[in-house]
Amino acid sequence: MTTLKTIELETQSNPDAAVIWLHGLGASGHDFEPVVPELRLPENARIRFIFPHAPNLPVTINGGMSMPAWYDIMAMDIDRTVDEKQLRQSAEAIVELIEREKDRGIDSQRIIVAGFSQGGAVAYEVGLTYAERLGGILALSTYFATASSIQPSEANRATPIRIYHGTHDPMVPESLGRKSYETLQEMGYGASYETYPMDHSVCLEEILDIGQFITRQLQLG
């Protein structure tokens, strides 16, 4: 996979932290760009938000049609049958973005990885396998696709993980979000789990919680 194209939004000049936020199937980096002002971060926050665009891939469940996707989904069964090789290739592309932020002077512990739906599955893989401590993992309306095959890094054993899910989600049932949470608990991770009365989307209460998480984890004013 070649280096991903991205959208970058800086809350102030000379950022000292970064949030890499992955969109869902069929969307683009523009999807979560409007969320940044709604996070209500402190005015002095110097964060670079990075919204990568997924490559176009044929997606089996959509009749093989090519669309922005982090990996192929072969079947919408209870646990999702996905192309784990493609998922890990996408994870490697996100690691490249993390390394680029480090090269720009940002400490890995001030980099948060977030993802919605498919993007969240990649965020799990990236956040739990990355060789250095990260600032946090945000998993929105998603599932732990590589739970049975992941090779975790001890560096992120204590990294905070926040999971959010809609109780009326018809695309990724809430049971998959809860199963991800329970699996992480069994693996020894200190994840937290929040639900909202919404479908496969985000809501203001959730966005505000994410803003508070970012503020807390990055120790903003």
Image (cartoon, rainbow, N blue to C red):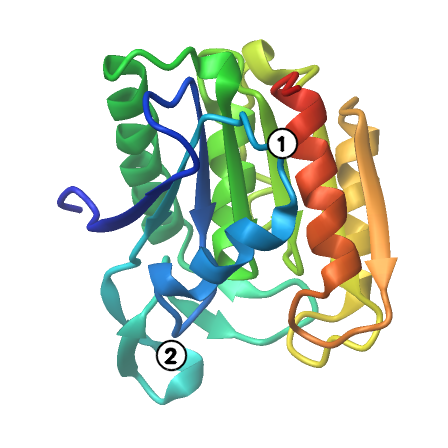
Say which residue label 1 marks. Answer: 42
Q: Secondary structure at mark 1?
A: loop
Q: Nearer the viewer, residue 206 or 38?
A: 38
Checking the image for residue 192, the label placed there is: none
Relative vertical location of residue 175 with respect to residue 153 in this rendering, above or below? below
Q: Amino acid at mark 2?
A: Thr
Q: Secondary structure at mark 2?
A: helix
Of the 4 image quadrants, the one containing the C terminus is top right
**Left of 132 or right of it: where is 71?**
left
As measured in the structure, the alpha-carbon distance from the residue carrying label 2 to the one carrying label 1 is 43 Å
Q: Position of residue 16 (x, y in %)?
A: 42, 17
**Left of 118 or right of it: where is 49?**
left
Which residue is located at x 66 percent, y 62 percent?
79
Relative vertical location of residue 10 with respect to residue 25 in this rendering, above or below? above
Q: Position of residue 184 (x, y in %)?
A: 75, 34
Q: Nearer the viewer, residue 72 or 50?
A: 50
Count the marks. Answer: 2
Q: Nearer the viewer, residue 188 or 117?
A: 117
Say whether residue 90 is visible.
yes
Q: Position of residue 154 (x, y in %)?
A: 59, 11
Say which residue label 2 marks. Answer: 60
Q: Amino acid at mark 1?
A: Pro
Tell me which label, 2 or 1, sits earlier in the chain. Answer: 1
Which residue is located at x 67 percent, y 65 percent?
202
